[in-house]
Image: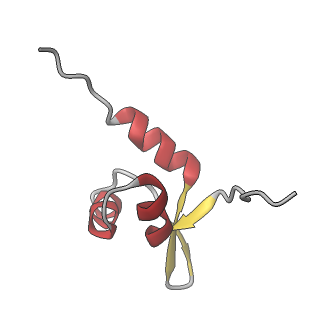
Amino acid sequence: MAGKIHRRLQSLRETVELDGGTIWFWRTAIWNGLIPVVKIGRKQFLDSRDIDRFIEQHKHQELS
């Protein structure tokens, strides 16, 4: 059975593809301390759990 394997760490490019935004959006969030980053050598990865938490924390509902 072929299925998508869920990986916990994803590159910035993968984050853009999976969760939206732009690479600069995510880099700015990292630089501003809004989301932690995992550095392996010169590469940067985001933890999918941190991305989910970031999204939940930044949700808001506009009342009309």
- Of 29 and 10, nearer the camera is 10
Count of marks placed on residues: 0
Name the outermost residue toward the left: 64
Q: In this view, does 18 lie above or below 12?
A: above
- Estimate the x, y position of residue 6 in percent, counting from the top left: 70, 55
Q: In this view, does 10 lie to the left or right of 59?
A: right
Q: Is residue 21 above or below residue 58?
A: below
Taking the image as shown, residue 32 lies to the left or right of residue 44, namely left
Taking the spot 50% from the left edge, 85% from the top edge, the residue there is 42
Vertical position of residue 23 compared to residue 5: above or below: below
User: On screen, 42 above or below 39?
Assistant: below
Q: Residue sitting at 32 percent across and 36 percent down?
A: 58
- The x, y position of residue 17, in whole percent, is 45, 63
Is 49 situated left or right of 30 in this image? right
Q: Which of 12 and 29 is in front in this view?
A: 12
Single out the residue that lies furthest toward the top.
Answer: 64
Q: Looking at the figure, which quarter contains the N terminus?
A: bottom right
